[in-house]
Image (cartoon, grey):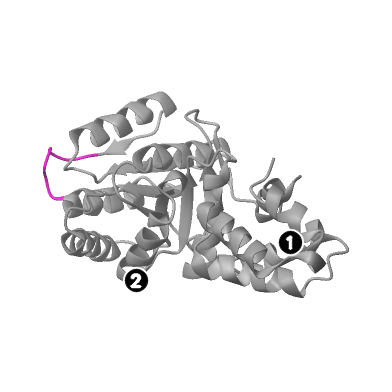
Amino acid sequence: MGIFTKFLSKIKGQSTLSNSDWEELYGELLASDLGPNFSRALIDEAKKSKGENPEEDLHRILLSQLSRQSRETIRAASGPTTILIVGVNGTGKTTSVAKLAALFQSRGSKVLLAAGDTFRAAAVEQLRTWGDRLGIEVVSGKENGDPASVAFDSAHAALNKCVDYLLIDTAGRLHNKNDLMAELGKVKRVIEKVLPINEVLLVIDATTGHNAIAQARIFTESIGVTGIILTKLDGSARGGVALAIEKEIGVPIKWIGTGESQTDFSPFDSESYIRALTQM
């Protein structure tokens, strides 16, 4: 059952809907983490609909609100494709780095990982464990060492080893967002002395609700996010945040994580996603 089931059942008879009915629907959309702007836009568009085929009308409206940017990975014209993965701690960032590496590897690409979250020993060890499991080399440094140093070393290693992809994990402490963004900016500048950064992927936890939009806005304004990895997307109402992020930030969701398994990771398909949300 999609998050719009009740919405659809009501707008089928929209000729009899009162203002209070519309406000009730607006509240339900907000509760599904769609955000105020997207929720109001949906209500306004639904009011204009003739109601003859509300499922198709809603499907069309939702698709029209999504980002028009490409969801394909931005590849380097030559040499390694360098991807910086950012996000706050607890979103599944390090696991997403490993899953993305496994997916690229399954397509026949050679991958190198960089354990740039040096402030969390557990993150470095987690990435090393994934590297051992996948047979992918992991560049790491000393605990509490300089993340930029790890990034710099990994960029040189990526060139020397002629890999197809360099995926760089980063710190995600948000106790002081200014410090975090300054640190990420330094990492980015250091890498770019060796290799251009092709993608900056932001990992967002779908269960964090509307806070995810604030995170996306901060990272996008500060570090230039090119795509989003949405984790813990299990088909529940909380998955509505994907729509809100694209509506309000404009950055495309490129990958989704739906579970703990290595295979629970795939490209984001907007058509399939919206069909799941609108199914009765």
Q: Residues within 10 Å of mark 1 (few under 14, many from 20)?
A: many
Residue 72 seen in the figure: no
Which residue is the extreme one toward the right? 52
Q: CA distance from mark 1 to mark 2?
A: 31 Å
Indicate whether 225 appears above or below 32: below
Q: Residue at x 32, y 65 (%)?
A: 218
Give the quadrant of the C terminus. Answer: top right
Image location of residue 125, percent across then percent down: 25, 30
Task: Give the residue at mark 2.
Answer: 221
Image location of residue 220, percent across then percent down: 37, 67
Q: What's the amino acid at mark 1? A: Leu
Q: Nearer the viewer, residue 99 or 245?
A: 245
Task: Give the overall secondary structure of the magenta segment.
Answer: loop
Indicate whether 141 appears above or below 46: above
Give the quadrant of the N terminus. Answer: top right
- Mark 1 or 2: in front is 1
Quarter occupied by residue 53:
bottom right
Q: Residue at x 21, y 48 (%)?
A: 150
Residue 249 seen in the figure: yes
Q: Nearer the viewer, residue 158 or 170?
A: 170
Q: Which residues are magenta?
A: 140-146
Q: Residue at x 25, y 52 (%)?
A: 151
Residue 16 appears left or right of 20: right
Q: Nearer the viewer, residue 274 or 251?
A: 274
Quarter occupied by residue 202:
bottom left
Badge 2 marks a residue whose secondary structure is helix
Badge 1 marks a residue whose secondary structure is helix
Q: What's the amino acid at mark 2? A: Glu
Image location of residue 21, percent across then percent down: 66, 62
Image location of residue 59, percent across then percent down: 74, 59
Task: Give the residue at mark 1.
Answer: 58
